[in-house]
Image (cartoon, grey):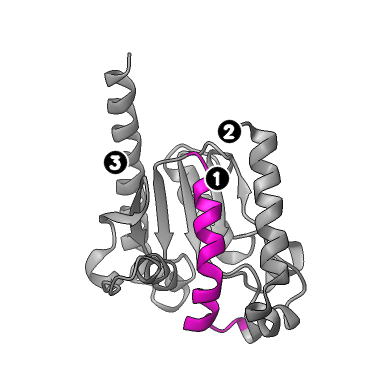
Amino acid sequence: MAVSHKRREMDGIQSDYERDHGLALLRKGAIQYVAGEGSLKPVAVILGEAPGQHEDEEGKPFCGTAGELLDSLIELVGLTRGDFYITNVVKYRPSRNRTPTDLEVKYSYPYLARELDVVNTKHVIAMGRVALDALFRGRGLTPQPLGQTHGYRHEGLVEGKFVWSTYHPAATFYRRDLYDVLVDDFSHIIREILGMEAENGAETT
């Protein structure tokens, strides 16, 4: 699929999301739709839960303090933000930066599934419980506790893709002990992804 066609697909997803009556109340309290951004042929998709205040104001995912921490994680593994596609499950900021409700996630999931289908990568990194739970519930599965599965690879949650899980950067603001866990998880996940892709590349040459 050509990049221009993929961009049109993304525009169509946004248009449909903005018209979804099930998201009308959520939309009413937000400034704007926060679209995913980055490479459409990335190392991986980085998936968060929903925009916060900074994201809502600027119209970009992961651009506040949590975004700065994400950027530092990406730099730590020798990559750049442009090597990834970054998005959220829910595209409008929930009021008062609250956690998205199960219903908001449910209404948002079909659009997320379409979005992930457009992005040409085999890997999705779910950052935080909400993002991981959305992928489990979207497949009709019971979510697994993030505390027991962070750093792991999950299969069968997104068709044609591997899902990796870790904590959301913002979680480290409330639990400093999670910072080292997040760094270790992210470094491990990227090493695994790059290793798998290198192995696949060797098999096709």
In the displayed structure, 137 sits above or below 10; it is: below
Provide residue 56's location: percent of width, then percent of height: 71, 69
Q: Which residue is mark 2?
A: 1
* Mark 3–mark 2 CB contact (< 8 Å): no
- Looking at the image, the residue that sits furthest to the left is 148
Task: Report, in whole angstroms, how far the alpha carbon at label 3 lies from the one at label 1.
Answer: 23 Å
Question: Nearest the camera: 147 or 85?
Answer: 85
Comparing labels 3 and 1, the label whose residue is closer to the camera: 1
Q: Magenta segment range?
A: 97-120
Indicate whether 27 appears above or below 115.
Answer: below
Q: Is residue 16 left or right of residue 135?
A: right
What residue lies at 28% left-to-right and 57% top-to-bottom?
A: 151
Crowding at label 1, few (<14), some or many (≥20) Cα neighbours within 10 Å? some
Q: Which mark is residue 192?
A: 3
Rendered-image quadrant of the C terminus: top left
Percent x, y of residue 3: 65, 34
Describe residue 156's horizontal placement relative to residue 86 as left or right: left
Tag 3 secondary structure: helix
Q: How many marks?
A: 3
The residue at which mark 1 appears reads as 118
Q: Earlier in the sequence, mark 3 or mark 1?
A: 1
